[in-house]
Image: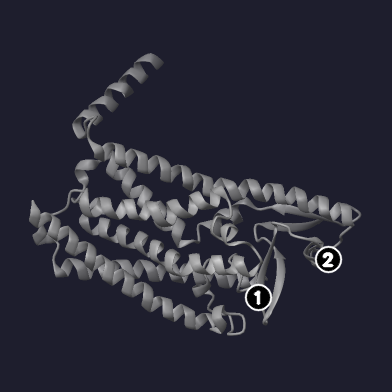
Amino acid sequence: MNKNYFSLKKQNTKKWFLDNYSLSDWKFWFKLSFVVILLAVLIMSYLKPIINSSIYVSQINDFIKTNSINSVLELIEKASQSGSHDWLVSSKENGEIVWNVIGSISFTIVGENKTLHANYQPFEDIWFRTSFFTLLSNMLVLVWMTTSLVKPKNEGQKGLLSTNGAILTATFITITFLIYQLSLRPTVIATSLGKGESLTQAIFPSATSVIENEVFHTFGPIAFVLYVILGMQHDSKENISTKFLHKNWMQGIIILISYGIYAIIRGLIKEAGGTPPTSMYAYPYFFLQVTTPAKDGLLGIPGIVWFFIFVVVIAAIYIGFSSLYKYLIIKRIDKK
């Protein structure tokens, strides 16, 4: 039974491959490599904090036991004075730097002696990471490329693989690329330098961080956009009209606004629970920190002002690059 099952699966796989690709078809190898690499890095981006947080819980409980600590405030105070701890994060509140334990770790009082004990919340960690537009846009790209790998003949035809879906996805990942390169990367480097780290440490904090950042923000977006413009099959030029573009703009901006509303509501909930508004555990990006006053905001600008600045910037990026991609796709069709 098992032999027949696996033999049938092998035959079906071979038939699927021969119907859609050949061994010399660069598209197959490009898509397969892209999917494998991006999937591996996405899995790593979730597993790494889960493993690290489990280690942090052990370190915190050892620190509590060694120093006979009875409260979270006492833990933060002693830990911030004793040196650097990866499970401590800083944020700005009322113009001053304050320290807190990373948001995925909670505390309970156990036993008759009412001992403080740290616990890890993996679902909180997953919720936190999935609030980042970077991960959401890369997941969308992964779904698009996986669907294209399995059903290449659907490219330019319907659904996610239509020209509209391709431009939508390509523009989202372009936003991820540009916001990171022009805003977030300089901010992270400047913050690291401000903490006394060297330029090398600021740019390359760790091997896994470099892999994640460059795959999610640089190489992945560039490779995907190039494939959409130069590699995929598109609908006829007549169907990629101005009306088509206006529909694409409306869809894209509605999705971006929906993401912003989700991220802000999530941040307000976290803030109500005691997470500082300037902490990334509340709002994933500084321009979403709508409740942050000027004295705590980046460059002394209130969070709500940064929000409206980036609403205009991101909308302009979306309209500009979706128009550019439509133009380049039409030019490619004209050359055929």
Please provide percent x and percent y for residue 116.
Answer: 83, 57
Tell me which numbered mark, 1 or 2, is placed earlier along the sequence. 2
* Residue 74 marker: 2
Question: Which residue type does callout 1 highlight?
Answer: Lys
* Residue 242 appears left or right of 288: left
Residue at the location (49% across, 74% down)? 287
Position of the N terminus, as image quadrant, is top left
The residue tagged with tag 2: helix, strand or loop?
Answer: helix
Please provide percent x and percent y for residue 163.
Answer: 21, 56
Q: Nearer the viewer, residue 181 or 29?
A: 181
**9 above or below 109?**
above
Q: Which residue is mark 1?
A: 92
Please provide percent x and percent y for residue 224.
Answer: 31, 52
> Disc 1 and disc 2: Cα gap in Å?
19 Å
The residue tagged with tag 1: helix, strand or loop?
Answer: strand
Label 1 neighbourhood size at 10 Å, few (<14), some (14-19), many (20+)?
Answer: some
Question: Which residue type does callout 2 highlight?
Answer: Glu
